[in-house]
Amino acid sequence: MAKLWAVIKREFLERVRNKWFIIVTVFGPIFFGVVMILPAYLSVRGMRDVKVSDIRIIDATGAGLGDRVATRLVGGPMGDASATQVQVVAPSEVAAAESAATKDVMAKVRRGYLVLDSLTLQEQKASYAGRNASSLGEMESIQNALRSALLGQRLEREGLDPKRVEALTRLKVQMKAERITDKGRGGSGLGSAIFGFIIAFLLYMMIVLYGQAILRGVLEEKTTRVAEVIVSSVSPDVLLAGKVIGVGAVGLLQVAIWLGSAVALYQFREPIFLKLGIPAAPALTLPNVPPSLIAALVLFFVLGYGLYAALFAAVGAMVSSQEDANQAAQPVVMLLVFSIIFAQPVMLNPTSRLSEIVSWIPFSAPVIMPIRMSSISVPWYELTATIAGVAVTMALCVWLSARIYRVGLLMYGKRPSMRELARWVRQA
Amino acid sequence: MPTLALELRGITKRFAEHVAVRDLSLDVPRGAVYGLLGPNGAGKTTTIRMILNVIAPDSGTITLLGAPSTSPGLLDRLGYLPEERGLYKKMQVRRLLRFLAELKGVDGKTADRRINDWLDRLSLRSPEKDWGNAKVDELSRGMQQKVQFIGTLLHDPEVVILDEPFSGLDPINAQALKDTVVELKRRGRTVVFSTHLMDNAERLCDSVCIIARGDKVLDGTVSGVKSAHEKRNIALSLEGAPTDAVTAVLADGALVARMDDNNRYFEIEMAAGGNPQLLLQRLVGAGAQVQRFELIQPSLHQIFLDRVGAAGVEEGMSGHG
């Protein structure tokens, strides 16, 4: 037991001390933070920055529609009215004004120009030309301003008070999306799906990263021949167990740090957004995650990691060089890739027969089941059976791998064929 | 206390294509320096791995320090230096050594004290530079070899097993290793080492066992082996190159059974019934300028060649037998 502990301690400490581990672990949350805050920040900054107001409006309507559009483009009566230039012209002068405006846009005096005429009033038709004509967002802003201005103008023509019109036409719509499951309503649908996907992806990433770390570790011990020194002190089984547990603990630590910092970021998002000058944090509701789901997730993580760690360890023990390792690891990697390519279809359609089957297969269950679980409620018996299936498969893989490991650890040279592998398993 | 440190009885190990060790029995007395000799592929490494319980023999029993070699805790009393040496390259030397000691059940404090002693002793630590704080891959090859010795001996093992310990050592480290072996013997420890270099074995070993192609060829104390193989061997050196007349005398099958040119002298094995005095007379008669004419014991090397034969060396498979 003391020796197992010594192996675990070495695996854990040597990896945690590694500067890349520290870099990745620290920069992970920063990266998440950026991913979380940047879109919100950019969209707000963008609204302010993008010069949709920096245009010229050639107004030939004779009804002051240009001023209305300008007011809306600069962000209401309080905005900087001078940002948008309104040029009121007679219908006959439109062509001349347009060619002058084109020159100004070419000389970068303005970003573009909007032409409003009698057709705009009658048939809601207008034309825009400018450097930003291909930007969908900016065109939509201008269109929105125009629609709102036209609406206001028409309402006033119908005899409504301009102030009332202003108040009535300035509305913002907010829609809250809520999910309904077999158990009733609860949580935001989008939130759950994203949560499930993040968890699945995290599981996948951890299994790939730390599974490969195990493979490299075993290979290192083989190629440097340290393995021989160690198995003269402890049995290969203890070495294998210590390695899998030690590396797994490093993975758990990393996930814990990442999740912890993500939760902290979420908790303190209001002050952070405020500091960055983003008025309102985007509506984001964390799905309500019951403890049973968390327990199941941890179980899937541990079992899934154990399953793949054992397979990667066996691959490491089979080969004697990095090139061989890459090839020999391919079947294992394929199993993992197979899981993750089903992640999106399952997320989009968690109730389909395909989703069910993929979430039952022990090799893909650790990645796929969490996605299904977070978007629909999976019956407890189905869940139990799946977990049992993964556990049994893991035990089998560990047993097989331990045997391959025992023999392979001291074998050098050419990669064993399937027949030789079978013999290793028998003779170990 | 059992008088034998190690006892092998009828050990056989087969691999898929060949028999690595066949019905091997040997006794290593406590406190002895024991040489396991043989050409490459003779089965030395396989034998050592079975002693260390890394692989199991197909048949036979191994008794270590009076207990079956599979007994729990026995490995802690053994030190092992493998033929192919290697360490975790990215690990700090001191941490690595502490880890190796912990694997042998030494507590951290004792390990730290012994590590410092050893680092001083093998001059890996001086007031200016403590290599114990460096990473393994910052060390020269020679220094890494020293670190590996330390790792083998940190837990003060009762039996030390060294697989080809002299291969790849520079003369300074070879000397340090030889001194360490002598020191271990002085302190009553048992040292078993394998080698294909007979000169090292002859200098260091109390007893030897020669194996070839998985079979034991002979074993016993070095002096016993030598006297059992005593032939009337003669060391002959001549002033200048031998003349044709001298060569003719040396080629006489009635006098000389075999002759081995050692460059500085010929090692001559007398034919059965051949008289050394007659040989000397005839050599002088042929006009040879004799510088040295001495009756000698055969070297282990000579015995090895006699018993195993050049064929045994060539047919031996390379690598780990």
Image (spheres, coloured by chain):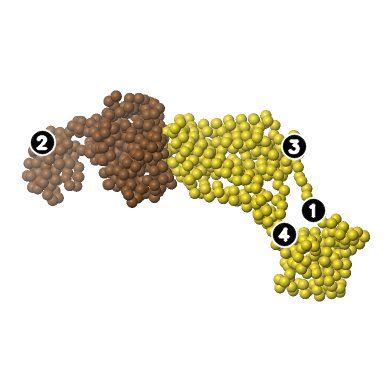
Vertical relation: A320 (above or below) B211:
below
Which sits earlier in the primary sequence, circle 4 or circle 3? 4
Chain-order first, disc 1 or disc 3:
1
Distance CA(mark 4)–CA(mark 3)? 37 Å
Residue at the disc numbered 2? B275
Q: Residue at x 58, y 31 (%)?
A: A391
Tell me the kind of residue under disc 4. Met
Tell whether label 3 touches label 4 (CB within 8 Å).
no
In three-dimensional space, the C-alpha distance between marks 2 and 3, rounded to whole angstroms, equals: 109 Å
Same-chain check, marks 4 and 2: no
Residue B152 visible somewhere in the drawing: no
Tell me the quarter of the image containing the C terminus of chain B: top left
Residue type marked 3? Thr
CA gap, disc 4 and disc 1: 15 Å
Tell me the subunit letter for badge 3: A
Q: Nearer the viewer, residue B196 or A73?
A: A73
Where on the picture, by quarter, is residue B204?
A: top left
Q: How many numbered discs, if any? A: 4
Which color has been applied to chain A in this rendered view? yellow
**Does the residue at mark 2 contact the one at mark 3 (Cβ under 8 Å)?**
no
User: What is the drawing colour of chain B?
Assistant: brown
Disc 3 packing (10 Å; few <14; some 14–19; many ≥20): few
What residue is disc 1 on?
A: A172
Q: Is residue A342 left or right of residue B64?
A: right
Instruction: Give the quarter of the image for residue B77.
Output: top left
Instruction: Please identify, in this view, whether the residue under mark 1 or under mark 2 is nearer the observer.
Output: 1
Look at the numbered disc 4 and give the secondary structure of its residue. helix
Q: What amino acid is at disc 1?
A: Lys
**Left or right: A308 in relation to B230:** right
Letter of the chain that mark 4 sits on in the rendering: A
Residue A47 badge? 4
